[in-house]
Amino acid sequence: MDPLLFFQAVKSGLLIGSVYGLMSVGFTLIIGVMGIANFAQSEWVTLGMILSYVLYTTVGIDPLLSLPLLFVGGFVLGVLVERFVIFKAIDAPFVTQLGVTLALLYIMRYTYLLTWGPFPKEISTWYSVHSINVSSIQLSVPMMIAGILASVLCILLYPLLKHTRLGLAIRASAQNRDLAFIHGINMPLVYMIAFGIGVGLTCIAGGLLSLSYYISYDAGATYALIIFLVIAIGGCRSLLGSVVGGLIIGLIQAVSATVFSPSMKYAFIALLFLLITALRPQGLFVRRGQL
């Protein structure tokens, strides 16, 4: 195999893996703070992709410039969904939580089908077909931008959680909800903000993916699998694990598709998942009760 093709696959895998990490960070933030597995998380990826397309084709806003709007829109919608849907199920049995989030998943997906239609669409900007040469390796400009921006956002999340009062409240809630409540933290407000941030980041990930991939009403089906594999590999409540898990999944996808066949990429991811489950079932990074 040509070494240049291999290294190109590695770089491409790292770039798309950064976006996978960003979308999974949103899921980790929600489950870490609220203790609820949001099975509808991937549908927010689809929403980000659709909104990016709509803003570009109707208003003329470049997908990159629309990313702050995607975050704000996702945050507001996330707050509303958390307050009127998810909040009611926080202390419910797991089966009830599963039913609520699955119901939300299907409502969102078939709303997209009714409004978006069954046919995929794509965003075509002036830089969509451009690539740059880095050490004799061709990299897609849209994917390079997406990977860099996703990495920057993941890095910026760290000081937000570590060095702000909001971050302190979020981390305290993740460690011990009852103790955080006793110390005067407004738990319903923390839940709303954490869910809103998680949804907003996932919408941004969708907007970044729309630069390089077709947009369809059921795109969330693919990204749901990726999110859960990333979380399982990296560790359920670890933000660092989400980022590293995303990079691992991106690398395996790109390298296996190049070395073997694109149809084999999920088989190799499944093999890695089984291997990690056998050797370290809690995931690569585990910080019990912490983010």
Image: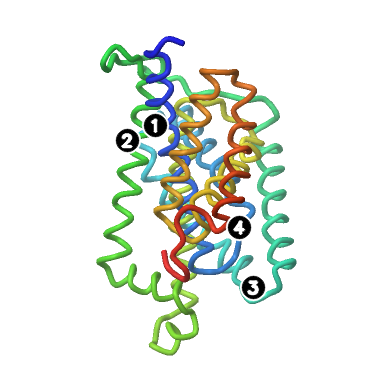
Point out the tag, 3 or 2, that comes first from the N-terminus. Answer: 3
Q: Which kind of residue does numbered mark 3 sit on?
A: Lys
Task: Write down the residue under mark 3.
Answer: 88
Q: Which mark is residue 15?
A: 1
In the image: residue 171, left or right of residue 255: left
SS at mark 4 in the image: loop
How far apart are the alpha carbons under marks 2 and 4? 26 Å
Q: Which residue is mark 4?
A: 38
Task: Give me the residue at 49% from left, 79% from top.
Answer: 177
Which color scheme did the rendering employ for the protein?
rainbow
**Of tags 1 and 4, which is closer to the observer?**
1
Mark 3 against mark 2, which lies toward the viewer?
A: 2
Q: Residues within 10 Å of mark 4 (few under 14, many from 20)?
A: many
Q: Is residue 16 above or below residue 188?
A: above
Name the mark on residue 148. Answer: 2
Is disc 3 placed on a helix, strand or loop? helix
Could you tell me how far apart the alpha carbons at marks 1 and 4 are, in whole angstroms?
25 Å
Element assignment for label 2: helix
Q: CA distance from mark 3 to mark 2?
A: 37 Å
State the mark number for residue 229: none
Whole-angstrom CA distance, mark 2 to mark 1, is 7 Å
